[in-house]
Amino acid sequence: MGYLEKISNTLPEFQGSNWLLRIPFAIIFIQQGLSKLPLNVEDAEAFNLPMTVWFFVAYGEIFSGIGLIIGGLLRIKFLWPWIGDLITRFSGVVIAGIMTGVILILEPPSIQYVLLHDSFHVILYVGGLFFALRGNRVK
């Protein structure tokens, strides 16, 4: 075993590091959802969306952000941690779905354009996928 590998093996594992992503993502999504309230037809039409979709986007953002926090807390404080894991995963699916819609509404000319010029939405999309695929598992 090499010297650098020994150093790497002695570094402690911080299992709470998911909170470094979870909290900012929750804040962003809760804030984005709250910024759409009160819901009105004019805002929905500005994005060429029906009011029903606008409703689900606004409340999906709010509740997926809250779900990230609650899902993480249930992992720590609850008898059945799988419930928190499911809440986290569902919130991640909702986030990824909303971000897919946001990216598609912008009608980008190519996927390359999205990756190079829409990094904020791509990061939120990938973060949603992270929570959807990883849930509360830390190892």
Image (spheres, helix red, strand yellow):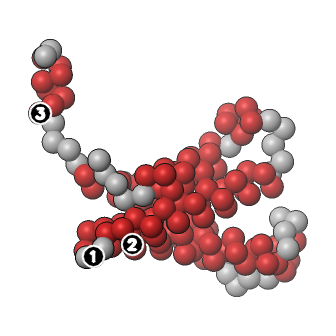
Residue 25 in the image: above or below residue 129: below
Which labelled disc corresponds to residue 78? Answer: 1
Which labelled disc corresponds to residue 10? Answer: 3
Which callout, 3 or 2, points to the residue nearer the camera? 2
Q: Residues within 10 Å of mark 1 (few under 14, many from 20)?
A: few
Residue indicated by mark 2: 83
Asked if labels 1 and 3 touch by Cβ distance under 8 angstroms, the answer is no
Q: Is residue 69 left or right of residue 77?
A: right
Q: Residues within 10 Å of mark 2 (few under 14, many from 20)?
A: some
Nearer-N-terminus badge (3/2): 3
| Residue under the image location 47 percent in, 56 percent down | 131
| Residue under the image location 72 percent in, 39 percent down | 114
Asked if labels 1 and 2 touch by Cβ distance under 8 angstroms, the answer is yes
Q: Is residue 105 left or right of residue 120?
A: right
| Residue under the image location 80 percent in, 35 percent down | 110
Q: Nearer the viewer, residue 111 or 90?
A: 90
**Dividing the picture into quarters, in which one does residue 39 lie?**
bottom right
